[in-house]
C-alpha cells in the first residue's frame, strides 16, 4: 500500500474509533456492528481475521460489549464522566475477561484478612513503626504522587494474573522513592515465583498475604533489572535478591468503607496504597471518572491496583488509580474512580507499607 493510503486508513480508523462511544444505534444494528467490528479487528490486529468460526464467536461477544457500552454511556452526567467503547478486551465474554485479566477467587483469598490479625489494625514487626496517624496534615484539594517523581511507568501484566504482586511492588517502589529520592523498578517476578503463603504466582494471590510473607520472612526485594519479569510463574531464585537489602518492615490492611476520608489521609500522610477492586466493568472502559455500575461488595473483588493520588477540585472528586494493563488502556494506563461510595470496592482492602534498606 502506498503511504497515503495507509495514512488515510489509519486516520479513518481513528475517526471511527473516536466516534464509537457516542454513536446512536440505528435500525440496521447488525450492519453497523459489523462495520465497527471490522475496524476493531484492524485497530487491535486480531489474529482471527481469517478464521470464520472464531470470527463469528468474537463478533457475538463484541456485540454484547457494544450494547453494554451504549447503556453505560447513557449514564454520563458530565464531560468528566467515564466513557466506554471497544478495548482490547471487548471481544471476550465476561467470563473470558474474568479468566484472562482478573482473578475470580480474589475475594475468597482476601476473606481471611477480614477475620485474622491483619484487618483493621496495623501489622508491624518489632523494627517497624507506622506513625502516620499521628501526623495530622490537612488534606489538600488534590494530590498526585506522579508529579513528585515517586511512581514508576505503567506496567503490563499480560496474561499473568499477578495484579496482587504488581500493585504491592509499585508501593514498595513509591515508598523507597519518597524516603530516598531515588526511583527504581523492583521485581514483580520475585513475588510471582517465590511468595507462598496462599499466593500462586500468575494463578492469583492477594496483597495482604504477600505483605505478611515479605515481613514474616524478612525477604529482600530484588530490583527489576536483577530479577526481570517473564510473564509466567517460574522457579524461585531468591539468591538474585541477595544484593538487595530492601525489605518491607510493616504494613496495614484496612477497610475504609464509609470512611474514605481516612483513605485520603493515608495517601497524603504516608504515600500511594495498594487496593483490591472489582474491575468487571473496566472491560470496555476508555477513560473518565467511573461513577456508576461498579459493584463495591467484598465478594466481587477480582483485581488489585495502586492509588497514586486524588482530585477533589472538580464536580466529581476522584481517585487516580494506576492499573497494570499497559499504557494503551484507559487514561494512559490510569483509571479514575469517584471518591465516596466504595465504587468498584476500592475501600474494602487498602494496604500501605514501610520499607528499610
Ligand atoms: C499483527 O499480528 C501478527 C500475528 O498475528 C503479527 O505477525 C504482526 O506483526 C502484527 N502487526 C502489528 C502491526 O502489530
Ligand atoms: C538511596 O540513595 C542513594 C544515593 O542516591 C543511592 O546510592 C541508593 O542506592 C539509594 N537506595 C535505594 C534503596 O534506592
Image (cartoon, helix red, strand yellow):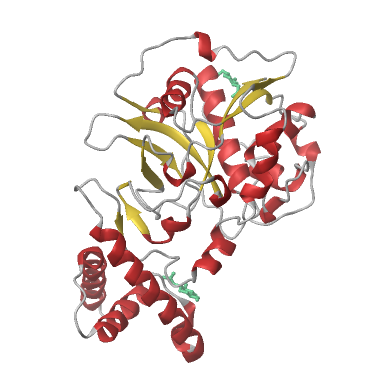
Look at the picture and state if 186 lies above or below 205: above
Residue at image location 44% in from the left, 33% down from the top: 308
Observer able to see residue 185: no
The number of discs equals 0
Residue at image location 28% in from the left, 66% down from the top: 70
Residue at image location 72% in from the left, 13% down from the top: 127
Judging depth in this view, the residue of 234 and 19 nearest the camera is 19
Judging depth in this view, the residue of 235 and 284 nearest the camera is 284
Judging depth in this view, the residue of 77 and 334 nearest the camera is 77
**For the N terminus, which image quadrant?**
bottom left
**Where is residue 330 drawn, in percent x and y?**
37, 52
Residue at image location 25% in from the left, 79% down from the top: 2
**Where is residue 302 drawn, in percent x and y?**
56, 51
**Where is residue 198 drawn, in percent x and y?**
76, 45
Quadrant of residue 240 within the rendered picture? top right
Look at the picture and state if 14 lies above or below 177: below
Residue farthest along the bottom direction in this orientation: 52
**Where is residue 332 drawn, in percent x and y?**
37, 48
Amino acid at each position: 500500500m502506498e503511504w497515503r493510503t495507509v495514512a488515510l486508513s489509519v486516520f479513518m480508523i481513528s475517526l471511527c474509533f473516536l466516534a464509537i462511544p457516542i454513536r446512536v444505534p440505528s435500525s440496521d444494528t447488525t450492519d453497523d456492528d459489523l462495520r465497527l467490528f471490522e475496524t476493531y479487528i484492524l485497530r487491535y490486529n486480531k489474529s482471527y481475521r481469517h478464521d470464520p468460526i472464531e470470527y463469528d464467536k468474537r463478533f457475538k461477544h463484541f456485540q454484547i460489549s457494544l450494547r453494554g457500552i451504549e447503556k453505560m454511556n447513557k449514564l454520563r452526567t458530565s464531560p468528566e464522566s467515564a466513557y466506554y467503547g471497544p478495548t482490547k478486551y471487548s471481544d471476550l465474554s465476561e467470563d473470558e475477561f474474568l479468566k484472562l485479566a482478573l482473578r475470580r477467587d480474589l475475594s475468597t483469598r482476601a476473606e481471611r484478612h477480614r477475620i485474622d490479625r491483619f484487618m483493621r489494625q496495623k501489622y508491624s514487626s518489632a523494627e517497624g513503626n507506622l506513625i502516620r496517624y499521628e501526623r495530622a496534615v490537612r488534606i489538600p484539594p488534590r494530590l498526585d504522587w506522579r508529579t513528585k517523581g515517586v511512581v514508576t511507568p505503567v506496567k503490563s501484566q499480560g496474561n499473568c494474573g499477578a495484579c496482587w504482586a504488581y500493585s504491592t511492588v509499585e508501593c514498595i517502589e513509591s515508598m523507597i522513592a519518597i524516603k530516598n529520592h531515588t526511583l527504581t523498578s523492583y521485581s514483580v517476578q520475585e513475588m510471582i515465583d517465590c511468595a507462598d503463603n496462599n499466593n500462586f504466582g500468575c494463578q492469583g494471590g492477594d496483597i495482604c498475604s504477600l505483605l505478611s510473607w515479605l515481613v514474616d520472612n524478612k525477604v529482600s526485594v530484588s530490583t527489576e533489572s536483577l530479577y526481570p519479569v517473564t510473564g509466567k510463574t517460574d522457579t524461585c531464585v531468591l539468591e538474585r535478591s541477595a544484593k538487595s537489602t530492601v525489605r518491607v518492615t510493616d504494613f496495614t490492611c484496612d477497610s475504609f468503607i464509609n470512611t474514605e476520608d481516612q483513605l485520603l489521609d493515608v495517601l497524603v500522610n504516608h504515600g500511594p496504597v495498594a487496593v483490591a477492586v472489582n474491575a468487571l466493568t473496566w472491560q470496555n472502559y476508555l477513560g473518565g471518572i467511573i461513577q456508576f455500575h461498579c459493584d463495591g461488595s467484598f465478594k466481587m473483588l477480582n483485581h488489585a491496583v495502586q492509588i497514586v493520588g486524588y482530585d477533589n477540585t472538580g464536580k466529581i472528586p476522584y481517585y487516580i488509580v494506576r492499573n497494570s494493563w499497559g499504557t494503551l488502556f484507559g487514561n494512559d494506563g490510569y483509571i479514575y474512580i469517584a471518591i465516596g461510595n466504595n465504587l468498584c470496592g476500592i475501600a474494602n482492602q487498602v494496604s500501605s507499607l514501610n520499607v528499610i534498606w
